Amino acid sequence: MAYPWALIGELSSESDWSEALRDCSAVVHCAARVHVMDDTEADPLAAFRSANVQGTLNLARQAAQAGVARFVFISSIKVNGEQTTRDTFFTAEDEPAPRDPYGISKLEAERGLFVLAEETGMEVVIIRPPLVYGPGVRANFASMMRWLDKGVPLPFGAIHNRRSLVARSNLVDLIMTCLEHPAAANQVFLAGDGEDLSTTQLLHRVGQALGKPARLLPIPIKLLEIAAGVAGKHAIAQRLCGSLRVDISKTQKLLGWRPQVSVDQALNETAQAYLNSQNSS
């Protein structure tokens, strides 16, 4: 089936969305200036606000004016914060505690959307996913698959953290639920696969999916953190060694939603897509 589409350009306060919004009853807003590890902007927060706050609210205002009934905003778990302990979880009701410009901009967009919902009557739904993976995944997850595929020994064999992930297919299924479920209106939901993994477990499971056993060295976390500090890579060390867990019980109870794909199924699909891309290149 062919779907109409419109090329708008940049996500900004000046973008004209009228063509894309014609005859739309709902909007799913995924576009954003994404998290950047080594941002070269002189004022990163201003750059994030321009796209993620001003650009988002411009789209939402035009959507409300066009008669859109529901606006689903893909936010980020970074609104909650950067990490939990191994035994605690972020929840949708937590007081937000973003730590970086990206997370701050997403929180400001959320708050602006709820104000707009009160003013216009357009329903808003917020989804905060953790790391999203699936076929075609890029950035650190793709690098991890390349290392494992090449059999590179990695010093991550003794990490006992817990991190939540969400497969792309599970996130899409949740979005579809939020588009139509009456109870989703003007709510915040966290997304996840329902199974949390340590970095060590994730590497082993991805290796299995690739058919390449992970070669992991049991280096103590303290040594990894010291080495990362010397290299100026604190943020990477936090993601590898720290925990970030999400509680999806509100999402499950209020919407009757359950992850449709298991972690292993999603990792197998992700790995197969990666292998196919390697074979075709």
Image (cartoon, rainbow, N blue to C red):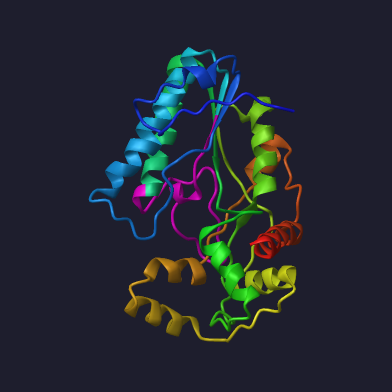
Q: Identify whether 182 is placed above or below 207.
A: above
Tell me what residue is drawn at x 74 percent, y 38 percent: 256
Does the stretch in magenta take in 52?
no
Q: What residue is rendered at 68% in x and 74% in y?
A: 204
Q: Quadrant of the N terminus?
A: top right
Left or right of residue 21, residue 197 in this image? right
Residue in the foreground of this view, choosing between 137 and 164: 137
Above-or-below relation of 232 to 114:
below
Residue 119 lies, in percent from the top left, at 43, 16
Q: Is residue 94 magenta?
A: yes
Counting from the top left corner in percent of width and height, residue 138 is at 55, 57
Left or right: 265 as drawn, with respect to 49: right
Where's residue 161, x and y in %?
56, 71
Please indicate, yes or no, whether residue 73 appears anywhere in the rendered image: yes
Where does the image place residue 34, in percent across and percent down from the top left? 43, 48
Magenta segment's dominant SS is loop
User: Is residue 271 rendered to the left or right of residue 129?
Assistant: right
